[in-house]
Amino acid sequence: MTSDLNRRGFLKSTAATGLAAALAPAIAHAADEPLGIVLVLPSPLGDVGWGHALSAGLDPIKAALGDKAKITVLENIPEGPDADRIMTKAVADGNKFLIAGSFGYQNGALQVAKRNPDVSVLHASGFMTAPNFSPFAARYYQATYLMGMAAAAVSKSGKLGSVSAFPIPELITSVNAFALGAQAINPKVEVSVVWVNSWFDPAKEQEAAKALLAQGCDVIFSNAQDSPSVVSVCEEAGAYVWNLNSSMQKYAPKKYLGCVATDWSPFFSQQINDHIAGTFKGTVAFLGVADKVVKVVDWSKDIPADVMTKITEAEGKIADGSLSVFAGPIAKQDGSEGVAAGASMDDAAIVAMDWHVKGVTTPLPK
Amino acid sequence: MSGLAFIIAGMLAAATPFLLAALGELVAERSGVLNLGIEGMMAFGAVVAFIIVHQGGGHAAGFLAAGVAGMALALVFAWLALSLRANQVAAGLAIAILGEGLSALFGKTYESTTVTGLPKIAVPGLADLPVAGGLFQQDPIVWLTLLATLGLWYALRFTKLGLVIRAVGENPGAARAIGYPVLAIRYGAVAFGGLMAGFAGAYASTVYTPLWAEGMIAGRGWIALALVVFATWMTGRVFFGAVLFGAVSLGGLAAQASGVSLNSQFLASLPYIVTIIVLGIISSNKRLLKINGVASLGEPFGP
């Protein structure tokens, strides 16, 4: 083949490659070659956190497909050229299903998808799509609303706090829904936010938590921290604490309020089955309580029974769509109208939310 | 006012990792050796101390082992930079990367685990003061670091050893001509730097933030390095700079928590800006800078 580098040979071989590409999924399936699945993560893989949640989402697939799937997890891959190179290499090695576990992988992962039409790519928290490239994100806000209800019930000071990573819409909506949920139980509740401007700096996260505790906050929301930094400092100080993605109850056995967990396995299974069947389509997957991707686990026993009943009720309504977290009337922080009475924010508005609701006391950085 | 009390109570502890590492680097640079590997030595010390404390060895053993670990890396650097006369910048960067890599390797199975920190020791009477009381209630390492700062200031300024170290940094040729073993003294100074960086790492992972997470040093070694330069190689200014940095970074968080309307990205960069401005003003005196600057810094010395 390599000696046929003339025009006729080239045409012949490209035609053959095109045919092969069209038949690729079928051939791969028929040849019973294991499906190579690669998960790329931005942080080190621990027992808790975002990376853990994604990798745990692949466990049921490992169990279901057995020898038919070969799962590789590449952890601690910095966003940028390194990630691009590693994703390209993973695909060149014959892997056909790529999960890019961080927003910053978007451009590199999209390039990989465009160059390799037979590869299916899932990309965390992005907004771009291609026929074989789907972004996915969790509707955390549906469950942080429920946590807000619980927080308002256990708070004595009426002041709640959040240590948050970066002021981006995904995190802002989580804080807003937390405040709205709390106000559903106690309208006077206030929420303070400290943005640490880092995805990962345990020492700074602990300092931020201590700053909030010094202000009298007695329930702290650890918003997007991958280590138990905030959770352990709150347990020590005797303040309730909760977090996202995976349960950190063992770090705060007394004061753990609950965890807004993400279970990606139903989504991953569906997408991988679609890939095997050759029906993978590039779509925006924005998944929440109804999809069983987002749910609260390890509820604290300190939540009063009557509030717990209300929470369960609200959870059911969110799942069947009769309760929308961002349904009007919602006032903005400065008192102006955010969402009109009778209206409700659509997905496009939610993923672009750049304002705080009334009751969040910290001004949003501009 | 609780925000102010929070800053006053926390600033010394926040400054301690910077201070420990910067004091060690100060001695190394005073002897004429620029070791850029602090970040790596801190990370390696942090993981070694964490593992020992996690296994039940206690904090004393943890700190000791972290010091030895930091020193071991520093000696690798010294061998490259002093014995083989490699470029000090390149060798230092290599140590920074090596240390971070080693910390990731050793810390793999301890990712996201926690240990208990150290109880605080209060100064009787003073600790009950309103607002400022928190200042007199610190963990033992903070108190020891303050003592070490004082001791180092005295040693560099008033002892013969301090004079010899400074002489070696100023003019290694002259120091050698009057019979001082320049390389041996530099080896010692670099090893001391490693020891202190190891302690700094141990403090970060077992006392200040008692948990292990890869990358938790998060650039603190580089800040310590910058502090030494901005403090124009003077112990008192290193102390002042570290505490200022700690106080301003806590201040940014306290301001946000109390709802002050300031940009959080600006607040996050404030410690760097304030430290640079303040130390820049202090060190704007050219004559003083010339007196304090280390003449042979970064230059290899051949026998």
Image (cartoon, coloured by chain):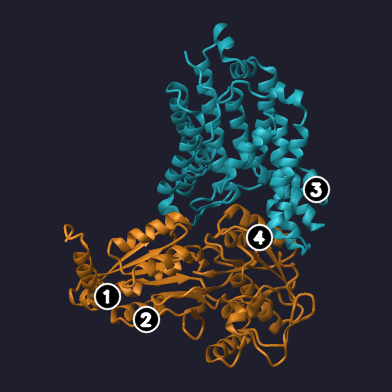
Chain colours: A orange, B cyan
Please say if the residues under marks 1 and 3 sit with CB atoms less than 8 Å apart: no
Q: Identify the residue position indicated by label 3 in the image.
A: B132
Q: Which mark is residue A242?
A: none
Q: What is the crowding at mark 2: few (fewer than 14 residues within 10 Å), some, or many (at least 20)?
A: few
Lateral position of residue A162 relative to residue A135, left or right: right
* First of labels 1, 4 by sequence position: 1
Kindly state the secondary structure of the residue where label 1 is placed.
helix
Query: Of residues A6 and B45, which is closer to you in this image?
Result: A6
Q: Which mark is residue A209?
A: 4
Question: Which x, y percent locates residue A339?
Answer: 71, 85
Kindly state the secondary structure of the residue where label 2 is placed.
helix
Mark 1 to mark 2 CA distance (whole Å): 13 Å
Lateral position of residue B256 relative to residue B53, left or right: right
Q: Identify the residue position indicated by label 2 in the image.
A: A270
Question: Which x, y percent locates residue A17?
Answer: 23, 70
Mark 2 to mark 4 CA distance (whole Å): 39 Å
Q: Which of pointers 2 and 3 indicates the residue nearer the eye? A: 2
Kindly state the secondary structure of the residue where label 3 is placed.
helix
Q: Indicate whether A137 appears above or below B201.
A: below
